[in-house]
Image (spheres, rainbow, N blue to C red):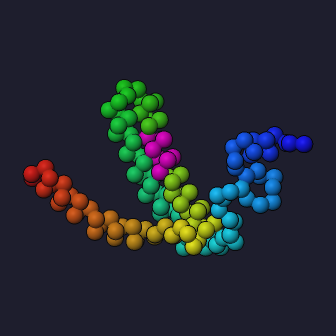
Amino acid sequence: KFLPCRRLAALSGLGCRRRAHPGPGAMPESQGKLVDATMVSSLATKVALNAAAGSLAFIPGCVLFRGTAMRCLCGGMGIGFGAGVAWTQFDLHVRHPGLVPMPESFVVEADRLLSVVPDTLRSMRAKLGF
């Protein structure tokens, strides 16, 4: 007798959670990686940077909407999406360390930004004719 889960799995072609083996195309579960203080520091840095970048969604919110609530909603959604992307990358690294690289620490991220930003500004000035 088909259970609802098996019926949906048969229709969609995906695996059923009740089965012992994963469906076609599923990533095999690995042992994962132990989380230490360095990894937590890296996670906090990545979440903070992505949330700060996502908070820039306030700007189009201020342009598009007149109400404070909608502007704050845009900013909050941007912060949430930014933090969620960082959390997902970290989670994937913990589950599959061989496939997904570990997010960098704050110092490495700051050095990377300091080396990229001046070149980007120079190229933008050249394109605009300043």
In the displayed structure, does residue 93 sit left or right of residue 79?
Answer: right
Residue at left offset 47%, top offset 63%: 45
Residue at left offset 43%, top offset 68%: 106
- Quadrant assignment, res 56: top left
Residue at left offset 46%, top offset 70%: 105
- Whether residue 126 is in magenta: the answer is no
In the displayed structure, does residue 3 sit left or right of residue 97?
Answer: right
- Whether residue 81 is in magenta: the answer is yes
* Helix, strand or loop for the magenta stretch, by majority: helix
In the displayed structure, does residue 130 sit left or right of residue 101?
Answer: left
Q: How many marks?
A: 0
- Which one is nearer the viewer's eye here, 69 or 22? 22
**Residue 109, image x and y in percent?**
39, 67
- Give the answer, above or below, for where 100 lies relative to 48: below
Point out the stretch of residues depicted in magenta: 75-82
- Quadrant assignment, res 33: bottom right
- Which one is nearer the viewer's eye here, 111 or 10? 10
**Residue 31, image x and y in percent?**
70, 72
| Outermost residue, top side | 66
Any part of residue 40 in sight: no
| Outermost residue, left side | 129
Any part of residue 92 in sight: yes
Q: Quadrant of the N terminus?
A: top right
- Which one is nearer the viewer's eye here, 35 or 15? 15
**Residue 97, image x and y in percent?**
58, 71
**Residue 110, image x and y in percent?**
36, 67
